[in-house]
Image (spheres, rainbow, N blue to C red):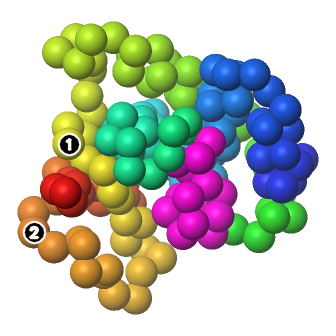
Amino acid sequence: MNLATLLWLSQLLPQPYADQACLATTVYLEARNQSELGQRAVAEVALRRLDSGRWGENLCAVVTAPKQFAPTLLPPDYGIKNLKAWNRAVAVALRVEHDWNRPPPQRRLVVPGADHFLVQAQLKSAPDWAQGVPVATIGDHTFYSVAIRL
């Protein structure tokens, strides 16, 4: 299946299934080669952005906001080819979303406060928002808290 088809199908699904598909797609595209901890951290960033209300009203809107996550950075014909990694990303996304539905004090946070991340190997230079001390580095992802206060 390719990215465009997967995102199109997610539009046909009722909530919360659409959000689960979009979160799993993002985990797969951003972190399929990472540890479960790294995948959880990527999912946590997307969920934190949803909670902030600044990037969209549902997870699909958050992860398809222009130039924010892999679903908008990769070509639409990008193939979802690794079934084992896809199944793992789905399982991780579902576990993180389940955990996120707990009251905030009961959540098991991997990257507390992080709402952005970078994949170091893919950068020529860090963006302006990547200043200061990162929340964590897990695998090849570095996580930052750069929430803009309005």
Q: Which residue is mark 2?
A: 132
Residue at far front of view: 150
| Magenta run includes residue 97 | no
Q: Quadrant of the C terminus?
A: bottom left
Disc assigned to residue 113: 1
Task: Identify the residue at image location x=37%, y=65%.
Answer: 118
Distance between the Cα atoms at labels 1 and 2? 14 Å
Whether residue 63 sits left or right of residue 46 in the image: it is right
Indicate the position of residue 142 as horizontal and vertical percent values: 29, 59
Going by the image, does 22 lie left or right of 121? right
Q: Secondary structure at mark 2?
A: loop
Near-viewer residue (29 or 17): 17
Query: In front here: 89 or 62?
Result: 62
- Let me know if residue 121 appears in the view: yes
Percent of width and height locating residue 48: 34, 38
Q: Callout 1, which amino acid?
A: Gly
Q: Amino acid at mark 2?
A: Gly
Name the residue at the left extreme.
133
Q: Quadrant of residue 11?
A: top right
Q: Nearer the viewer, residue 91 or 130?
A: 130
| N-term-proximal mark, 1 vs 2 | 1
Which of the 4 image quadrants contains residue 21? top right
Question: On the rendered structure, is 43 left or right of 103?
Answer: right
Against 26, residue 58 (above or below) is above
Q: Is residue 60 above or below residue 141?
A: above
Find residue 130 and name its label.
none
* Residue at (62% x, 42% y) in the render: 60
The relative height of residue 102 versus residue 116 in the rendered view (above or below) is: above
Label 1 Cα neighbours within 10 Å, binned few <14 / some 14-19 / many ≥20: some
Is 65 included in the stretch rendered in magenta? yes
Q: Which residues are magenta?
A: 60-73
